[in-house]
Amino acid sequence: MNNFESKLLNTPLKDIFLKKKVFDELLPFDEYHLVMAQSDYLLNIHNKSAVKTYFYRAAPFGSSYILTAGLSAFLAKVDNFSYKQIISYLENKGYKKEYIDYLKMRDKISVKIYSLPENSVAFPNEPIIILETTLHDARILEGILLSEMNFASLVATKWHRIQKAAMNCSVMEFGRRRAQNSLKASLYSYMAGVSGTSNCEANHFFGIPSSGTMGHEFIQSFATEYDSFDKWLEINPEKPLLLADTIDTLESGVENAIKVFKKHKDKLINLGSWNKIGIRIDSGDLAYIALQSYDRISKALDTKDVTIVLSNDLDEFSIQDIFTQLTQAGKEYIIKHISFGVGTKGATAWGNPALGGVCKITEINNTYILKISNHNEKTTIPGNLRSSFVIDKNGEYITSLIHFYNEDYKSTSKFVHVFDDSKFMNNSSSKYDILSVRQHLVYISDGKKSIFEGKYSCQSMLEIRENSKADLDMLDWSYKRIVKPHRAKVSLSDKVFKVKNYMRRNNLLQMKG
């Protein structure tokens, strides 16, 4: 990591968004948000207090949880947004003059934002972000929030799974060529724990370490594979990684790599690059070829410091399969010499095209609001909510308890299933410990002045990368495995469940708190 990268990685991430306006949009919402906001004003209900909760219903990729991402970008976008910037658009669209006149007197959105720290573990139905605002501003905030949180959390979760499958091996992201949003894919891959990126734009904006070696076309630019390797090490001795599968990996690529490494050995040793030598394999039976290549190169050069970089449409499942094959063959020694280059399937969140994150209104003027659905799983949880982890005496996760923001949640004696009151756990004699509220106040705006509140609103990328570790350490391995993990329990306090159940059984959309 150079000084340029270090400075950016230690800068509060929201400051980068505020200054460079990387993801800013003129109109960061959908038409129906504006139509509802105008209707609120014309009905004179726009200043009613409102609470909106952002959560998701089902974890993607068959996982039991997600890693949250996008908070810094969301806060910066809210802070950068001004109602004055959309006046011309509204006039051209034919919005009501009285509504436009009202917005001309407005500037910033008025809101208090509570959130899980960025890069936290979050479970289905758990409040991730809570907006305390007005009914009018709640409409607008939803559009901004969903556009910044959904894809970010989806792709961060995918990269987390890939890095987890790779264990302690390095993973480089190079999905720019095929990602729906290459900058976000690179940013949130690094947030989730990968080592770096090939994306120069991500390096420029955020300081994410970037690197690149040769592609097949470099080799094809020479008469022979050997010539391309020789010239590469002649001018790039600090990057002694050779792409070995253009012709035949074992019979051509590996043999030519050995020859040129021997030729340039003294220079590489003098430059301190000899312990970085290696090859990249981009096709074929990766586990078998990796093992054969490592054994041949390390033996021929009398060194164990040989890196084998594997690529070619990898994801968490194929990486795990490669390690399973090597372990079953009794060749675990090679695993620490492997690293991975992952592109398309990480950057596009392969296997799950979208995160079903939603932002639902849960309270208006201190009145509980409930959305009732024929599908029980789509019935919302009313009220101004928070959550707290419940752990056993060994510090291991038991459930995430959803409770009202102002209730005595640590005295809760019963943890009820979100949708089924026949399933519950008793906390008699304080069998379990209930930890502190997970959501923190991160932003306050009165419509004129704004404050980024608390440490979680001002974290650098390097600090954000550490946030998930404590959460993950609480989880049993069975929740974290790639294939068929156990589903983590999420519960309601008895008080929240009773309110929800009463409203649902009586078909009440509103109930006074």
Image (cartoon, grey):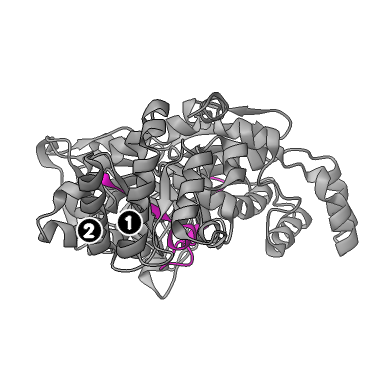
Does 141 sit above or below residue 36?
above
- For the question of whether residue 217 can be seen, the reply is yes
Q: Residues within 10 Å of mark 1 (few under 14, many from 20)?
A: many
Q: Tell me whether circle 2 and circle 1 mark residues in contact (CB < 8 Å).
A: yes
Asked which secondary structure carries label 2, the reply is: helix
- For the question of whether residue 361 can be seen, the reply is no
Position of residue 160 in the picture relative to residue 476 (left or right): right
Q: Which comes before the other along the chain, label 2 or label 1? A: 1
Q: Which of these two is toward me, 313 or 396?
A: 313
Q: Which of these two is toward me, 371 or 466?
A: 466
Specify the amino acid type for callout 1: Val
Where does the image place residue 82, in percent across and percent down from the top left? 76, 41
**Residue 5 within the magenta-colored segment of the rendering:** no
Pointer 1: what residue?
Answer: 254
Specify the amino acid type for callout 2: Gln
Nearer the camera: disc 2 or disc 1: 1
Q: Quadrant of residue 113?
A: top right
- Residue drawn at 83 percent across, 53 percent down: 99
| Distance of label 2 from label 1 (alpha carbons) | 9 Å
Position of residue 435 in the picture relative to residue 98 (left or right): left
- Residue drawn at 31 percent across, 37 percent down: 469
Q: Which of these two is toward me, 237 or 500?
A: 237
Pointer 2: what residue?
Answer: 292
Asked which secondary structure carries label 1, the reply is: helix
Q: Which mark is residue 442?
A: none
- Residue drawn at 90 percent across, 55 percent down: 97
Does 498 sit above or below residue 190?
below
Q: Which of these two is toward me, 262 or 426?
A: 262
- Residue drawn at 63 percent across, 51 percent down: 144
Magenta span of residues = 337-366
Where does the image place residue 352, in percent across and percent down from the top left? 43, 67
